[in-house]
Image: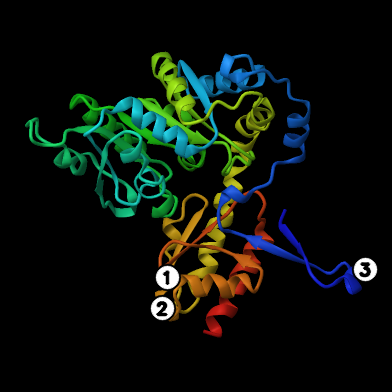
Amino acid sequence: MSTVASTGTAQDADQRTRIVTVDLRSDTVTKPTPEMRRAMAEAEVGDDVYGEDPTINRLEQRAAEIFAREAAIFVPSGTMGNQVAIKIHTRPGQEIIGEERCHVFNYEMAMMAHFSGCLGRPILAENGILRWPQIERKITPKTYYYSQTGLVSLENTHNMAGGTVYPQGIADEICEGAHAAGLPVHLDGARVFNASVALGKPVAEITHKFDSVMFCLSKGLGAPVGSLLVGCKQFITQARIYRKSLGGGMRQAGVLAAAGLIALEQMPKRLHLDHENAKFLAQGLAPIPGIKVDPAKVVTNIVICDINGTGMVSADFSRKLAEKNVLCGSVNHELVRFVTHMDVDRTGCERAVEAVKEVVSHS
């Protein structure tokens, strides 16, 4: 499937000239499947703020079951899910340890400070994968004039590290060490199903030591809207309070949950295709002069390339690529990101490689 843009004027519209755009900016650009659209149209709904939307209730129950947790809550976005979790786990004036490029620190509008009154304590880690000794060294001493560490937050897969995946043993060791130090651990699992597929283990197994987990339905799973936060019953009861305070009471949102149920039940089984396409894309990009990417490190659906060797900055590179109907994302001046998903097939990836070759050759 592809994004389609019409070209031409009214005079030549009868020729039905169409240009297919390969959109690799993010897996958030996916469109709901026909089955999702039908389910949305037919969804049974009620007022979710009163707990009366049966479709949302089913979605939350299934999420809790799949993650082997007591309860779950549907939220409009991953950012809201993460920030609600941070609010519950911390108190104002505390610090949150996370990897330097993590989403909660860089891409959630400083909400850990604004909403929870907390500071980030970022640690740069190779491939975005923190180890317990790195974290342990950053836990502040129990001295009254230090801001106390309140939470450890991990991201799996790690978006801006190139979709890297936490090995099970490392994630477990971090959780065990943090708990021994009296600290909760939250998982930003926006793409945790991609991690599950890459590891060949169910999400319940790879997340069971975390105190809370947020995951998105609207990325690789293809739903149009929504994320879920899972944890114990007491945690989710508190989460309902903070979701409402952030304006997340969505009333008859069963129309969204209906698509989310299909995403949750059916879409994880096809994620391996996105991983294979990302690997193919990385292997095609790696030999291009000026493009630096290691295909061996591409294990899920995200490819981050260093384009410094092309002599272009990422904004110019992305613009020239868009002129050839291939879209990518700009990370910073030197890095661009390609994300594979269900609406881009192998042919689209081939077109992307050829477009990059043309852009670089004319730079």
Residue behind mark 2: 309
Inter-mark Cα distance, 2 to 3? 44 Å
Residue 245 in view, yes or no: yes
Instruction: Check disc 1 and report its element: helix, strand or loop.
Output: loop
Report the residue marked by disc 1: 292
Residue visible at 41% across and 56% down in the picture? 297
SS assignment at label 3: helix
The reply to whether callout 2 and callout 1 are in contact (CB within 8 Å) is yes
Q: Residues within 10 Å of mark 3 (few under 14, many from 20)?
A: few
What is the image's colouring? Answer: rainbow
User: How far across and down, in percent of the image, does residue 224 sit?
Assistant: 64, 40
Local packing at callout 1 (Cα closer than 10 Å; few below 14, some 14-19, many 20+) is some
C-alpha distance separating marks 2 and 1: 8 Å
Picture coordinates of residue 93, whole percent (x, y): 21, 34
**How far apart are labels 3 and 1 at the CA level?**
43 Å
Q: Nearer the viewer, residue 196 or 40?
A: 40
Amino acid beneath label 1:
Lys
Instruction: Report the number of numbered marks.
Output: 3
> Left or right: where does residue 64 sit relative to residue 183?
right
Q: Is residue 331 above or below residue 248?
A: below
User: Of the residues under marks 3 and 1, which one precedes in the sequence?
Assistant: 3
Mark 3 belongs to which amino acid? Asp
Q: Position of residue 198 (x, y in %)?
A: 48, 43
Mark 2 surroundings within 10 Å by alpha-carbon count, few (fewer than 14), some (14 through 19), many (20 or more): few
Which residue in the rendered view is the most extreme toward the right?
A: 14
Q: Is residue 324 above or below residue 119?
A: below
Residue at image mark 3: 14
Residue 26 drawn above or below residue 53? below
